[in-house]
Image (spheres, rainbow, N blue to C red):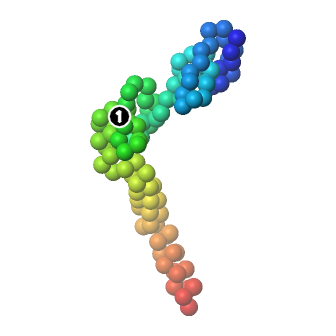
Amino acid sequence: MLTCETCGNTYDKAFQVVLAGRTHVFDCFECAIQALAPSCGHCGCRVIGHGVEENGVIFCCAHCARHGATHGLRERIEDDTVAGVVGAAGRVPGGSTAVGMAAMTEV
Ligand SMILES: [Zn+2]
Ligand SMILES: [Zn+2]
């Protein structure tokens, strides 16, 4: 009897997966995927096939690899976040408040 490290179920048909020298125990493949499968660098889905590796990042398919490789995942997320925050708050009072405060601290 082995205990699944993802859900804690104790199951007589549990199996072990050795990844990078470490042994993991799971009661089903779904739990193994949840714990060990990489996530696509673009869409975030679980990569359970070979996937596509681009600059050390794993993607689920060629489309995601192309998209992720063009922009770079981290840059994309940061750009989107900054653009979203600035776009939403910048035009509203936030912008003028920041300018006003900067002027006040200068004086
Ligand atoms: Zn499980
Ligand atoms: Zn993807």
Q: Residue 49 location in percent, x, y? A: 40, 25
The quadrant in which the N terminus is found is: top right
Count of numbered circles on the image: 1
Secondary structure at badge 1 equals strand
The amino acid marked with disc number 1 is: Val
Residue 41: image quadrant is: top left
Can residue 56 be seen here? The reply is yes
Can residue 84 be seen here? The reply is no
Residue 13 vs 76, above or below: the answer is above
Observer-nearest residue: 27 or 50?
50
Q: Tell whether circle 1 marks a residue whose Cβ is less than 8 angstroms from ligand 2.
A: no
Q: Residue 102 location in percent, x, y? A: 52, 81
Q: In this view, does 25 lie to the left or right of 103?
A: right
* Residue located at (54% from left, 31% from top): 20
Few, some or many residues within 10 Å of mark 1 (<14, 14–19, 20+):
some
Q: Is residue 19 left or right of residue 43?
A: right
Which residue extends farthest front? 21
Q: Residue 57 location in percent, x, y? A: 41, 41
* Residue located at (59% from left, 18% from top): 16
Residue corresponding to mark 1: 52
* Residue located at (44% from left, 63% from top): 86
Observer-nearest residue: 10 or 99?
10
Residue 105: image quadrant is: bottom right
* Residue located at (54% from left, 88% from top): 106
The quadrant in which the C terminus is found is: bottom right
Q: Residue 23 location in percent, x, y? A: 61, 25
